[in-house]
Amino acid sequence: MSNAVGPNFLTLQVRDLERSKRFYTELVGFTPTESKVPTAVVLDTAPIKLALRQSAIDLDSVSELGWGVVLWIKAEDPDKLAKELAAEGVTITKPPCDGFCGREFQFKDPDGYELTIYEG
């Protein structure tokens, strides 16, 4: 019997690839890296890569994208990042607070995906 190892790559399908690329690189601070897929942007995140891909499905056919799934992303200074994102008009759904993993907050990206930033 063969066993799965664990997540190695995550992809978010997005409505507007360029808008999402700007959001994740200019506001969140990720760096793009090489992508073999012309309709995708791969972000140089660790320990696994995060990709943004032009949607191949109708994202507007559901009321909430990724409902029940939250991506946890480490950051050196969650409070500072929360302030910067809020200043850019990003929806902060849970303000910075002390959580199980240290300082954390939640926000929504341009497509409505929920992300948690934490100190780790």
Image (cartoon, rainbow, N blue to C red):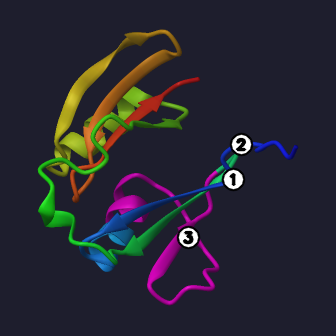
Residue 15: name its quadrant. Answer: bottom left
Residue 105 position (above or below residue 108): above
For the residues marked 3 and 2, what is the alpha-carbon distance in whole angstroms?
19 Å
Residue 1: name its quadrant. Answer: top right
Quarter occupied by the C terminus: top right
Q: In the image, what residue type sits under mark 2? A: Gly
Tell me which residue sits at (43%, 11%) in the image. Answer: 99
Q: Which residue is mark 3?
A: 42
For the residues marked 1 and 3, what is the alpha-carbon distance in whole angstroms?
13 Å
Mark 3 or 2, which is nearer the eye? 2
Mark 2 and mark 1 residues within 8 Å of each other at the beta carbon: yes
Q: Which residue is mark 1?
A: 8
Q: With 17 as the anchor, is 88 left or right in this view?
A: left
Q: Which residue is mark 2?
A: 6
Q: In the image, what residue type sits under mark 1? A: Asn
Residue 37: name its quadrant. Answer: bottom right
Residue 52 percent location from the top left of the image? 44, 68
Residues 38 and 98: in front is 38
Tell me which residue sits at (11%, 50%) in the image. Answer: 63
Question: What's the magenta region?
Answer: 23-45
Q: For the view shown, which residue lies furthest in the right direction?
A: 1
Which mark identifies residue 57? none
Residue 51 percent location from the top left of the image? 51, 65
Residue 96 percent location from the top left of the image? 31, 21
